[in-house]
Amino acid sequence: MRRMATEDPRIAPLPRDEWDERLSRLLTTFPRGTEEPMNIFTTLARQPELFRRWLGFGGALLSGRLHGRLRELVILRTAFRFDGRYEWAHHIELGAAQGVTTSEVVALGGDLSAVEWDPFELAALTAVDETADEGAVTDATWSNLAQRLDSGELVEFLMLIAHYIMLSTVLRSLRVQLEPSAAALAEGVAGGPPA
């Protein structure tokens, strides 16, 4: 994908003195809290009603019925395929907490064949690639996924991919900046979306 001419944010994150109670409380739940607030939240909070509703939707996906490892594999591959550097950087750590190894993260950010995947996980990653390449999951991949996921989980799986496509494009268009700690984490892993 073509990079923007400038990397300055198009909409600046809300300054600390404009945070409401919800945003302040949310930021304290993350490892770096309010000392290094996450720019995704302080930027999207500029539209407070939509932000509130989006938090509910995103939270439902992060604590849904899909296994945590599968969820993080799909998020990382989607972030890579749709040039979502912000989400990529933040989900490296979240993926590790769900058992995604460094060599798997490297493969997710480049050549999937560099790792020998479980066939079901490979089908899930193939679904992300088919969505990127064809705009939809093929019948063969759907059939493989449907052997392990019920109809509700299949809907959730597709919504997960779509949500991280949306986030990748929104954050890239807004030019939301990575926080220093997240940027350092992403730089420490080969591959992934370009900086």
Image: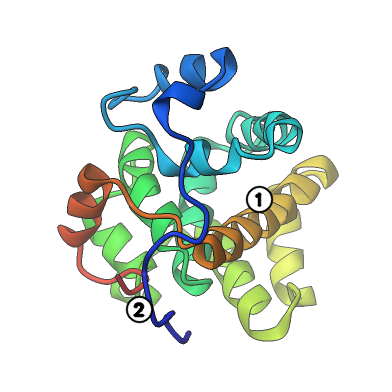
Kindly identify the residue that appears in the image at 15 percent across and 58 percent down: 188
N-terminal-most mark, 2 or 1:
2
Across and down, in percent, residue 130 comes to: 64, 78
Spot occupied by residue 34 in the image (x, y as percentages of width and height): 33, 23
Mark toward the viewer: 2 or 1: 1
As drawn, the label of residue 160 is 1
Regarding mark 2 in the picture, which secondary structure is present there?
A: loop
Residue 88 higher or lower than 143, as above or below: above
Which residue is farthest right? 151
Helix, strand or loop status at disc 1? helix
The reply to whether the C-beta atoms of the residues labelled 2 and 1 are less than 8 Å apart is: no
Direction from residue 95 to residue 51 in the image, left or right: right
The image quadrant that residue 165 belongs to is bottom right
Residue in front for this viewpoint, 69 or 13: 13
- Dot 1 surroundings within 10 Å: few (below 14), some, or many (20 or more)? many
Label 2 – label 1 distance at C-alpha: 22 Å
Q: Position of residue 94 (x, y in %)?
A: 38, 39
Q: Is residue 34 left or right of residue 11?
A: left
Q: Residue at x 45, y 53 (%)?
A: 87
Split into 4 quadrants, where in the image is the C terminus? bottom left
Image side of residue 99 versus residue 21, left or right: left
Instruction: Say the numbered circle drawn on residue 111.
Output: 2
Residue density around tag 2, few if under 14, some if 14–19, many if 20 or more, within 10 Å: few
Count up the numbered dots: 2
Report the side of 160 relative to 74 (left or right): right
Q: Amino acid at mark 1?
A: Leu
- Three-letter code for the amino acid on which mark 2 is drawn: Asp
Q: Residue at x 72, y 35 (%)?
A: 57
x 59%, y 66%: residue: 169
For residue 15, say whether it is visible.
yes
